[in-house]
Amino acid sequence: MSKAQITIWLSLLWMTSLGATDIIFQSRSATALNGVALFPDSTFEKASMASFQEGELFEILGESVLQHEDNAQNQKFKWYQVRCRDGRTGWIFGEGLAVIVSDDSIDEKLRLYHKRDIRLNNGFEKAVMWIAGIAGRDNIHSQDFLNPTHKELYLVITNDRGRSVHLNISGESAMGHTILHDLRLYDTTGDGIPEILIQTGSFSLNDQFEHRNFGIYSLQAGVLTQLLEEYMSLNYQEDIPSPALFRQIEVDQQIVRIAYVDYLSCSDYRLAHDPKTSNKHQERCLEYVTYTYRWDEKARRYQTIYEESRSALRGEIRTDHVALRTEPSVVGKRLGSLAKQTPVEVIKHFERITIVNDQSKIIPYLYIRLADGTYGYLLAETVSFPDVEHGHVLRSYYQKQPLSKLDWKTNHSFLKIVPDPRSSYSGK
């Protein structure tokens, strides 16, 4: 494919992004993911004709009807007949080739980034974004219909010289799957060029625990480089999610703030309050954690400007006449009655197990401290957290606690992007 042909193809994408909906693609395109080999036919039997580096652009001329085994025989993909930029044609095995996704199959949250122009740096001042993927099967069983799907989805950015960079945004295989929660373009470094902000969640095979990650990526020397990575998932215990679920992340121009409620073993409690340790299997102490990063232009990386700070989780009583007791039980000695909006510091989460209709049920209590220094237990459902980022999530959890923490889910995004008036990419 000549440079003129590539420019025409990119121009079609740009015209589409500007609203020219009558533009129709005459061919499908693909980009190499980790380097690929060009073969004279759709087999591995003959020597390859050439090899291409990651980011090479190809025009798809055709594809095999069936999926074929790779050299290791552990996966199956289609073969694609392609035309290279130098005009040569041949066949490339599909495991290393991300092919443009059809418009009608694009997820709604990705439509903004499919066939859209973007202006970056380092040779990508004129470029286009598009969504591409690979699709095959993990070759585990002799019968194909039993073999699990293998899919990978990528955000691809191609410049006017036919070079591409890509970022994996979701996938599915025999080992598990990854989902996309959020994808944004936002200038976090203050240079007028947008970075890519992405939030994904990964699940191992037969595992309900979500490993969620947030990352900021920037084009550096023609390569997509990760500037910041933050693991978001919060544990109650190993592979059991915390009631707070995930770290809250706020991006405000060149500042990234992190906040979360930490449910930790009371033996690791770091604050000055007495946690009154009683049963390590039924309790977790609570600490409210914050820290902040700032982009350092001179160092070209994020620096911690506020180190991790741990303090007591603060809440308030939701209703009048809430009983404060010496023990996490309705039969515990009553210390007093608390009025609505009484401020409290939450020291500990305690789970009392009771039997209701021959079934075990967990009733959560909170061990709290009042302003006058009084400690005591109260039902967790009687406390709200109006000044904490996780307040809505915690209140929902304690109002209607799930039978299992693995069932605990929420629609809360845990990612807040503060619009930057300097950037045309803010909030998109």
Image (cartoon, rainbow, N blue to C red):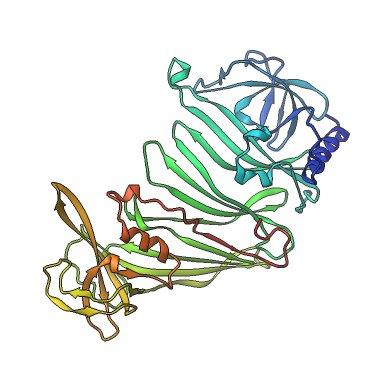
- The residue depicted at 24 percent of the width and 72 percent of the height is 275
Q: Position of residue 149 (x, y in %)?
A: 50, 28
Is residue 268 visible in the rendered structure shown here? Answer: no
Residue 375 left/right relative to 62: left
Q: Report whether 63 appears left or right of 19.
A: left
Residue 169, image x and y in percent? 58, 43
Front in this rendered view, residue 276 or 337: 337
In the rendered structure, the answer to whether residue 138 lies left or right of residue 50 reads left
Q: Nearer the viewer, residue 413 or 222?
A: 413
Residue at screen point 62% across, 30% down: 96
Residue 137 percent coordinates (x, y): 51, 25
Q: Residue furthest right?
A: 4
**Could you say which is closer to the camera, residue 237 or residue 351?**
351
Image position of 335 with respect to 143: above or below: below
Q: Is residue 40 above or below residue 298?
A: above
Question: In the drawing, does residue 357 fall left or right of residue 192?
Answer: left
Give the quarter of the figure containing the C terminus. bottom right
Q: Is residue 293 visible?
A: yes
Instruction: Name the residue: 15% across, 74% down.
Output: 326
Going by the picture, which residue comes out furthest to the front? Answer: 320
Q: Quadrant of the N terminus?
A: top right
Q: Position of residue 419 (x, y in %)?
A: 64, 65
